[in-house]
Image (spheres, grey):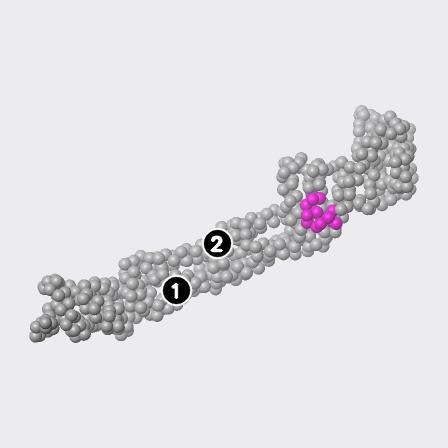
Amino acid sequence: KAKPSLPENFLETSWKKLAEAVDAIHNVRRVEHSREELYRMVEALCMHKRSSELCKLLEGVMDQHIRVSIESLVGQTPDYAAFLGLVTDTWQNHCQQMQSIRNLFLYLDRTYVIRDSGQRSLWEVGLNMFRKYFEGATDVKNKVVHGFLHLIDRERCGEAVSLSTCTNIVRMLVALQIYEESFEKMFLAETSNFYRRESSRLLQESPVSDYMVHVEGRLKEEKQRVARYLDPQTRVPLVRACEKELVAAHVQFLLEKGFEPLMEGQRTVDLERMYSLLARVNALRDMKVALAAFVKNRGLKIVQNEEAEKELVPNLLKFKQDMDDLLKDAMHGNEDFDRAMRDASEAFLNSRASRPAELIAKFIDAQLRTGAKGVGGEEETEALLEKVIVLFRFLSAKDVFEAFYKKDLAKRLLLGRSASSDMERSMIAKLKTECGSNFTNKLEGMFKDIELSKDLMANFKQSRQFAALPEDVEMNVHVLTTGYWPAYPAMKDLRLHETMVQCRQTFEEFYFSKHEGRRLTWQPSLGNCLLRASLPCGRKEFIVSLYQSLVLLLFNACAEVGDELTFVHIKAETGMEDGE
């Protein structure tokens, strides 16, 4: 059976109707013929091997129409916004028309164009034609690009622009595959120029803090611009270009003019903003250097201020706390920054040789003497001492600290001035953690001596020797291990009161009966006395040092009230040195 054939001149008669339909689509008129009839014509031609001829005829009509459409834009209005409106209208008409044409020639598109011609579809054929004539019309292309850049520039300056126009222009450039080459490169260059000019102007006019707020706003605007109409691929290079001109190019200026005032004012929010901006451009190392310099310089002012030595440790603690707060809240607890601060602290704290070590030891002594009474409770004192240990950690002259601390500890233990034995032991535990057991062996030995002395005195008060003491005399002795305690000068010529001599001899008799072969060396400089006195104003009690008691007891030998004793006489009777 013979295959049916097409009537003679079927291609010509069919194309005439199809061409009229395409022309109606191009000119936005109603298609006169039935779309089903037209579709069947296309199907019949394709099935009878006339696809190639039909496709060439269609491409010729499309090519001519697209060329005329692009050429019609040449020499149009110089107003960029109006011109871009015309371009977007042309583009949208093209897209709509190509969609209608593809629907009409769908059978051709699926059986020939996609399969045999090497094109993906009639839609792609139309895009290629539009791109060819758009790029060929240099004036139109340049005007579109410069007009779009001008529109963006106006938006950056605060003017309202047509979002739909911007969106359609971007879609057109992306669809034509010329977005990156023809627009994005120039857009990024113009962006750099815009922000280079703006940053230079604002840095001369505005404080650094205000400038950084503006930068944050600009970066947010550019991200929103991408989200609203630019192609997503532009986001990374766009933000990078903005960061380079707004931040990276001015890192040193921002730090030199803004960092110190922000630190002085403890402006956490502004410093956090600076940290975040510099982190964007990998400039945190510069900020770390600035931080170290600031901490060192401020610390040096505190340490070198001899007139405010009494407040040295409190001032250092406050400064340290302020810096720690800024490190945590503004600089995200950056470990490199923390190390830089520690190095700077070590540098300024050791800038005055051993004096800070002495003052820190004295400060601890004051806290342990006043204890809970001084600062509102043992817990608060404990917290304060924990902070002081941080300062101690930076000291190079730890041996100087140890000498002063041991001397002060001896006074607290021997004179009963320590507010809390628990806090004393806690402090020694802290020092042991920092420096090891070798550092605290002697300090722990001092505590051991005090405990042993308590047991010794309990036994002494039960002994027959103690019972032989005068009734109105009380005696308490601390027996100390020489190697644990500070060295004290001996006063060989000191002449004790006869009652004191009797007490000393009584204790020695008791002690040597318990410990044969040992030797006792008395240290009067560490002694203290409670004297009861009958004065014209009544009976009084005096808590004095042993040396003071020797002087006061001399007045018992005065014949009358009001008699005076000369310095020479007192020195001769007591055997004390001039300094004492």
Badge 2 local density, few (<14 within 10 Å), some, or many (20+)?
some
Name the residue tied to disc 2: 273
- The residue drawn where x is 85% and y is 26% is 472
Q: Nearer the viewer, residue 18 or 562?
A: 18
Q: Please indicate whether residue 540 sits to the left or right of residue 320 in the image.
A: right
Seen in the picture, residue 479 relative to 222 is either above or below; the reply is above
In the image, 103 versus 436, the foreground residue is 103
Give the image quarter of residue 350: bottom right
SS category of the residue bearing label 1: helix
- Asked whether the viewer can see residue 566, the reply is no
Amino acid type indicated by mark 1: Thr
Q: Secondary structure of the magenta portion, mostly?
A: helix
Which residue position is annotated with label 1? Answer: 191
Report the span colored magenta. 427-440
The answer to whether 321 is drawn above or below residue 413 in the figure is below
User: Within 10 angstroms of label 1, few (less than 14), some, or many (20 or more) residues?
Assistant: many
**Residue at the spot 67% in from the left edge and 35% down from the top edge:** 373
**Secondary structure under badge 2?**
helix
Q: Quadrant of the C terminus?
A: top right
